[in-house]
Amino acid sequence: MQDKEIICKDCGKPFTFTVGEQEFYREKGFENEPVRCGTCRRERKNARSGRGR
């Protein structure tokens, strides 16, 4: 396994899906790779919980 570069679905910037993150996803049983960078994931989570930015 090796690091993967993925383009964020929201902002279009590339981010790295590290080997450690891939192992974590596999351990948790997640079948899909992330589609958003960490910043966009946090912003989306905050918006959904009503906190805004």
Image (cartoon, rainbow, N blue to C red):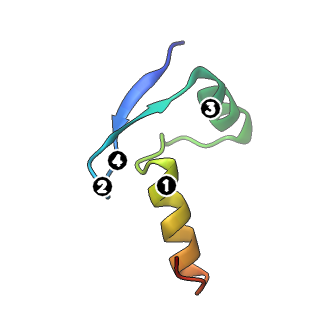
Residue at the extreme bottom: 50
Look at the numbered discs 2 and 1 and tell me whether their residues touch, using CB distance below 8 Å.
Answer: yes
Specify whether 36 is left or right of 28: left
Q: In the image, residue 2 lies at what x, y percent? A: 51, 13
Q: Secondary structure at mark 2?
A: loop
Which numbered disc, 2 or 1, marks the residue that appears first in the sequence? Answer: 2
Q: Quadrant of residue 4?
A: top left
Look at the numbered discs 2 and 4 and tell me whether their residues touch, using CB distance below 8 Å.
Answer: yes
Circle 3 residue: 21
Spatial distance from mark 4 to mark 3, Cα to Cα? 16 Å
Spatial distance from mark 2 to mark 4, Cα to Cα? 6 Å
Which numbered disc, 1 or 4, marks the residue that appears first in the sequence? Answer: 4
At a point 40% along the width and 48% down the height, the residue shown is 35
Look at the numbered discs 1 and 4 and tell me whether their residues touch, using CB distance below 8 Å.
Answer: no
Q: Amino acid at mark 4?
A: Cys
At a point 45% along the width and 30% down the height, the residue shown is 16
* Foreground disc of the pair 3, 1: 1
Q: Amino acid at mark 3?
A: Glu
Q: Secondary structure at mark 1?
A: helix
Look at the numbered discs 3 and 1 and tell me whether their residues touch, using CB distance below 8 Å.
Answer: no
Circle 1 residue: 39
- Label 4 crowding class (10 Å Cα cut-off): few <14, some 14-19, many 20+? some
Circle 2 residue: 11
Could you say which is closer to the camera, residue 36 or residue 33? 36
At a point 34% along the width and 47% down the height, the residue shown is 8
